[in-house]
């Protein structure tokens, strides 16, 4: 797990996937690994990513990290309404998680909920101003202009 996590940190995705898949051979019910593999496959193999995240959700239907990944994959597939419901539940279960808050703001924007998105993203920036997520949130806030103030 540590090796796979290191590969993930350094964006060595192919090595991370290979390592995670070895973990799944030994423990096919390991939810964090299923979640991470799904996330890593999101761009290169979206259908495969969805298979992994659905397995994870079957095992841990209320896990906020699984809900977050499922929300983002669902958004990618075009179902914004379902993605919003999933990310809202993830945010309720893990309100301090910066990635989940950023994803909530992104999905709120996709739904045209500019005022809610601004509130979510502003709170994220205030809570962790030096984080990578705050920088991404700031960029999204800048796309809002003054319309959602």
Image (cartoon, rainbow, N blue to C red):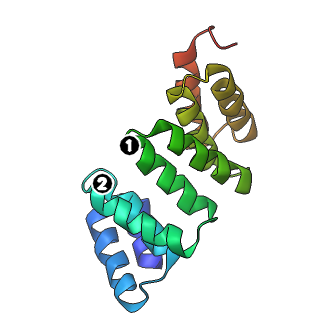
Residue 54 in view: yes
Above or below, 124 relative to 41: above
Asked if residue 12 shows in the view, the reply is: no
**Position above or below: 94 against 144:** below
Name the residue nearer the viewer: 106 or 98: 106
Q: Residues within 10 Å of mark 1 (few under 14, many from 20)?
A: some
Where residue 45 appears, as percent x and y from the top left, is 25, 57
Residue 96 rendering spot, x and y as whole percentages:
73, 51
The residue shown at (58%, 31%) is 108
Image quadrant for the C terminus?
top right
Q: Is residue 71 left or right of residue 62?
A: left
CB within 8 Å, label 1 to label 2: yes
Which quadrant holds residue 101? Answer: top right
Task: Classify residue 133 as left or right of residue 75.
Answer: right
Q: Residue at x 39, y 84 (%)?
A: 23
Query: Which type of secondary structure does the marked residue at label 1 adopt?
Result: helix
Between 136 and 60, the one nearer to me in the picture? 60
| Residue at the image position 63 percent from the left and 59 percent from the top | 64
Q: Where 2 falls versus 14 (above or below)?
A: below
Q: Which mark is residue 76?
A: 1
Occupied quadrant, residue 25: bottom left
Q: Earlier in the sequence, mark 1 or mark 2?
A: 2
**Can you tell which mark lies on residue 46?**
2
Distance Cα–Cα, label 1 vs label 2? 9 Å
Quadrant of residue 34 within the rendered picture:
bottom left
């Amino acid at each position: 797990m540590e090796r796979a996590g290191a590969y993930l940190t350094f964006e060595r995705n192919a090595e991370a996937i290979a390592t995670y898949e070895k973990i799944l051979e030994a423990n096919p019910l390991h939810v964090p690994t299923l979640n991470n593999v799904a996330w890593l496959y999101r761009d290169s193999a979206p259908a495969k990513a969805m298979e992994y995240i659905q397995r994870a959700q079957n095992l841990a239907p209320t896990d906020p990290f699984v809900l977050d990944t499922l929300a983002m994959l669902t958004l990618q597939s075009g179902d914004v309404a379902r993605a919003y419901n999933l990310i809202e539940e993830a945010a309720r279960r893990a309100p301090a998680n910066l990635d989940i808050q950023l994803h909530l703001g992104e999905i709120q924007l996709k739904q045209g909920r500019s005022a809610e998105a601004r509130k979510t993203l502003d709170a994220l920036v205030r809570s962790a101003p030096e984080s990578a997520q705050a920088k991404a949130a700031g960029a999204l806030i800048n796309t809002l202009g003054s319309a959602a103030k």
